[in-house]
Amino acid sequence: MTRKDYDVEHLIYILKGLHQRYPHLHIILEPGSAFAWQTGPLVAQVVDIVENHGIQTAILNVSFTCHMPDCLEMPYQPEVRGAESLPFEAALQPDAKAQNIYRLGGNSCLSGDYMGSWRFPRPLEVGQEIVFEDMIHYTTVKTTMFNGIMHPSIVLEHEDGTRETLRTYTYEDYRDRMD
């Protein structure tokens, strides 16, 4: 509702019509993205690049299952900074490698811990950052520590580009959740 291009007048029209048809109901709008929009990115690093049946998968140090479950549940494919989001099938093209098309994979043991297809301007490299835009609002509240997968650290990036770590999770955080 807070996006620049959102048709607020149409929403008001729909809600008024609903109220006229069902005057006894109380309408409650769940704010969702209206309050938690553009809250911050999830920053990952490439830890390996594997190829199987011609599909290049960049394995990341984050997990879709553990850190981005909304991507698997909704389905929702996040924007990746500096990359073009493509249909999943794009990774199956015979020339996908030449076009720098990758599927992104998580670091859990689950075989379905991967997501979509993205085209990058250059081939990816181990150690390279992959930035998932607008992910922190779900990453911080829906994460799990399935099989000991750690939560990502919470980091504040200052306007000058320096980063300050506010919270780092440890094995003890995982252990204490099992208590």
Image: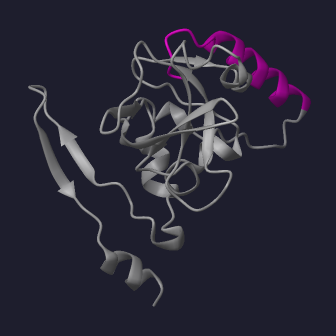
* Colour setup of the view: one colour
Q: Is residue 179 left or right of residue 115?
A: left
User: What residue appears at the point 13 percent right and 28 percent down from the top-left corner?
Assistant: 161
Specify the principal SS of the magenta part.
helix
Q: Position of residue 14 (x, y in %)?
A: 78, 20
Q: Position of residue 112 (x, y in %)?
A: 68, 51
For the image shown, how many numbered marks are present on the structure? Answer: 0
Task: Kindly indicate the quadrant of the structure image that contains residue 57.
Answer: top right
Q: In terms of depth relative to the viewer, which is nearer, 2 or 98? A: 98
Q: In terms of depth relative to the viewer, which is nearer, 145 or 9? A: 145
Is 128 above or below relative to 1? below
Q: In terms of depth relative to the viewer, which is nearer, 16 or 134? A: 134
> Is 82 covered by the magenta stretch?
no
Q: Is residue 111 left or right of residue 120?
A: right
Which image quarter holds the N terminus? top right
Is 140 above or below relative to 127? below
Q: Is residue 176 left or right of residue 7?
A: left
Q: Position of residue 83 (x, y in %)?
A: 46, 18
Q: Position of residue 46 (x, y in %)?
A: 39, 40
Which image quarter holds the C terminus? bottom left
User: What residue appears at the point 41 percent right and 29 percent down from the top-left corner?
Assistant: 38
User: What residue appears at the point 63 percent right and 11 percent down from the top-left corner?
Assistant: 7
> Is 15 covered by the magenta stretch?
yes
Is 169 above or below relative to 4? below
Query: In the image as oriented, which residue stretches furthest toward the right?
Result: 21
Q: Which residues are magenta?
A: 1-21
